[in-house]
Image (cartoon, grey):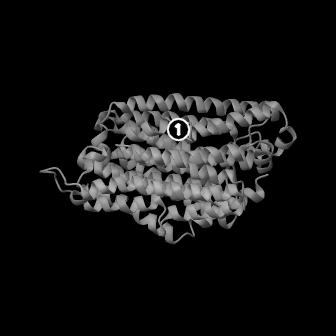
Amino acid sequence: MNALFSQAPILAIVIPLMGAPISALFRGAVLPWAIATMLSAASFWFSIDLLVHVNTVGPISYELGGWEPPWGIEYVVDPLSAFVMMVISGISTGVLLYARESILKEVSTDRLGMFFAAYLLALAGMMGITITGDAFNIFVFLEITSLSSYVLISMGERTDRRALFAAFQYLVMGTIGATFILIGVGLLYAMTGTLNIADIASKFDAIAHTTPVRAAVGFLIVGVAIKLAMFPFHIWLPNGYTYAPSIITAFFAGTATKVSVYLMIRFIYTMFGEDFSFGEIPLTSMLMTLGVIAFLSMSVVAIFQDNLKRLLAYSSVAQLGYMTVGIALASEMGLIASITHVFNHAIVKTGLFLTVGAIFYMVGSTYIKDLAGIGQRMPITSFAFVLGGLGLIGVPLTPGFVSKWYLVQAALERGDMVGYGLTIAMLISSLFAVIYVWRVVEVMYFRPAPEGAECKEAPLSMMIPCWIFVIAIFYFGIETSVNIGFAEAAASFLMGGAK
């Protein structure tokens, strides 16, 4: 291991974290964007190196400041954290490649330095949540992510003043979720005398029966559920996605909620343990019920939306329901399905939101009624949206199908009526997805464009990243060695070596 790579766990976080104030110093449209893009790409490069190393050599423990855990803060890179870090930094870099032209339409030039500073802070926070092995450090990085997210969403006010309300709504819900998580961490610290996750896990069984620990588990699960936008705690997400700048919607759709899914998996399998989570407390029935309600009800709600970004936002809540059900199945196959869907949905939904951003750039609206004839006016962008929609539905040869196939297998493994019922519910939800995707396609292709409407695509700098994601949808739907391979490694590690 060379000297540079030996510092990769900290560099993946420090690079965007230290780059944020540097970006804030610059004005204009090019330098802040270029700095953010290069730093995100560097973080992505380190993440790939870490992922390869962990899956060939083994997990990495990095001690900050030379202080040994549990006294010092420890960064832990295992198959799950490395995989999620790669997803976060990869999505971030792809979105930033797209951002140069897009953001000029939605954020004033004199604020771009601060905008990209907040973006880098959000990236550093999410990467930190994923890699840290310290429970309180999770809360710290969670607050870095949240505070920068509120700022980023509010910056959509140039095109819609409702962005301020969306940011405030997110702030209120996010603060409640963070407070619950902090209370849970505090109770665990009071009972164990440590904040190191591995140390808490080693002591957990001895104190699992106590009231403070059970209360801590409740606070942590509910707090993460709020951050996750799990039904019925999802009310902040539709407005946040709808009124934020286009690149922020794409960035958060591919990363923010996925980090919370990671956190849910980490708490359940690493800290609490599978036996306690699914045996001592009724987590299976609770998560499964909420997950099924989410992917059925939110798919129905998406059908009736008049704004394309809001439609896709409700679709995201539905897709998070699939991930929740995968966790609730409490099996290795279910965990593989959930982790795989973190990756697959990130690729699909980021690609879709980037196509919507390109449409907004040219049309100035994301209301479905204003997209009449877009199929003729912007054929390349419209076709990209259709292909992304196929991935969202879960058509064969797309990653959405791969995720659902594994989830169906996990459900049928149960061999009971619950498993069969889950399979039927997922099929119904997919049919609902066909309906809401078709609603948009019908307006795009089968309604006449307004007279005098311009026929022109978005700039090439936006279209190339957009199509990279669209091509990736089909690549990872056919060649599954990355998404399934790394998900299997992560699930096997968690099921076999969590405690």
| Residue 190 x, y percent position in the rendering | 79, 30
**Nearest to the observer: residue 256 or residue 137:** 256
Q: Residue 453: give x, y in percent of width and height.
A: 16, 51
Q: Which residue is mark 1?
A: 234
Residue 12 vs residue 191, the one in the foreground: 191
Question: Could you say which quadrant of the image residue 219 lies in?
Answer: top right
Q: Residue furthest left?
A: 452
> Does dot 1 land on a helix, a strand or a loop?
loop
Q: Quadrant of residue 342?
A: bottom right
Q: Is residue 377 above or below residue 237?
A: below
Q: Residue at x 59, y 65 (%)?
A: 484
Q: Which of 10/285 is in front?
A: 285
Is residue 357 in sight in this rendering? yes
**Left or right of 183: which side holds 94?**
left
Q: Residue 91: x, y in percent? A: 47, 54
Quick one: which residue is furthest to the bottom in this view?
479
Looking at the image, residue 201 lies above or below residue 326: above
Q: Locate residue 456, reporting x and y percent.
A: 20, 56
Q: Nearer the viewer, residue 460 or 35?
A: 460
Residue farthest to the right, as pictured = 206
Using the rendered image of the protein, determine whether residue 43 is visible from the camera's viewpoint.
no
Q: Quadrant of the N terminus?
A: bottom right
Q: Total marks drawn? A: 1
Tell me the crowding category of disc 1: few under 14, some 14 to 19, or many 20 or more residues within 10 angstroms, Cα based. some
The residue type indicated by label 1 comes to His
Residue at point 35%, 49% (across, down): 99
Give me the residue at 45% from left, 28% from top. Answer: 168
